[in-house]
Amino acid sequence: MTDAAGFDASGDRQLTRLERAIDRAAHRVLAGKPDSGPRAVLIECAVFLLKQAWACIFGALLLVVIVAARLWYPDDAVLARNDALTIAAILIQVGMLAFRLESGRELWVVVLFHLTGTAMELFKTDVGSWSYDGDGVLRIAAVPLFSGFMYAAVGSYMVRVYRLHSLRFTRYPSIWATTIVAVGIYANFYAHHFIFDLRWVLLALVILLWGRTIMHFRVWRAELRVPLLLVFIGVALFIWLAENIGTWGGAWLYPGQEDGWVMVSPQKLIAWFLLMIISVVMVTWVYPPRAPVDDQGSRN
């Protein structure tokens, strides 16, 4: 939670106007609640889940639209389903800005996710890694424009959770080293179609770089810490589950799903884990990792 001025507990990341209103209401509701015992634990769990839901609102809304289109969008509609998904994704992004759920600074990261994701989509669909329906005009080659928003949704979650939980890190690796690894991961998504697949080497480098890093995060009263690699694994699992919903909704299909939906292979977890590393590194360009207050002295 934050103070009445709309800053997080460290005093350096301002919430949006809507988030400040929600924060004040939350303080009123939780005022006087116990700070120890089972009820306190339940309150912290509830706040954690609510913050996580708030952080992934972009992706959640996009998944709702995809599922709704699968269930109820008419096949004979004048507007192709892919075009409808693209328009819906644009409206969600406009709404995120209009309601100040993302700052201009964070928007740059989301746009960067969008561009890098779309570039990879163009390549991957060309080599047959996955495919989209051929309908619609809002597309680049075989890639409907809504696909870039799926990557942007991951970026939106990353920047928002960093702010909402006031993330701090112990023994975080240097930005230049993590950037080199992220570039290598991104290049391997292309290069492994032509030369050796270096994903296991890259995975080893990730473990080497982040293996000792501890993430500190605030829920409400509680300030917790967890090995960062475990967080990476958890987020990759969550994205993989969302990917299963997306493919079930027909947003895109992998080979083997054309004749009927089947669960996405768990092997994709490695790809999502590595892709998430790229996401984390991009976020650190906007929000440089900071040590906990106890590690860097008090702030005035």
Image: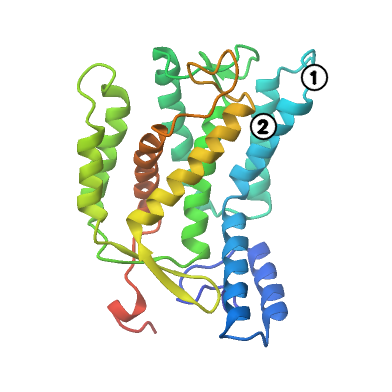
Residue 111 in picture, x, y percent from top left: 49, 39
In screen coordinates, is 108 left or right of 137? Answer: left
- SS at circle 2: helix
Q: Residue at x 29, y 18 (%)?
A: 193
In screen coordinates, is 281 left or right of 74? Answer: left
* Mark 2 vs mark 1, CA separation in Å: 13 Å
Name the residue that disc number 2 marks: 66
In the rendered image, is residue 139 in sight? Answer: yes
Residue 97 in picture, x, y percent from top left: 63, 49
- Considering depth in this image, is 160 or 111 the residue closer to the camera? 160
Q: Quadrant of residue 173?
A: bottom left
Label 1 environment density (alpha carbons within 10 Å; few <14, some 14–19, many ≥20)? few
Name the residue that disc number 1 marks: 74
In screen coordinates, is 161 left or right of 20? Answer: left
Checking the image for residue 225, the label placed there is none
Residue 51 in picture, x, y percent from top left: 59, 62
N-term mark: 2 or 1: 2
- SS at circle 1: loop
- Considering depth in this image, is 247 or 162 the residue closer to the camera? 247
The three-letter amino acid code for the residue at tag 2 is: Ile
The three-letter amino acid code for the residue at tag 1 is: Pro
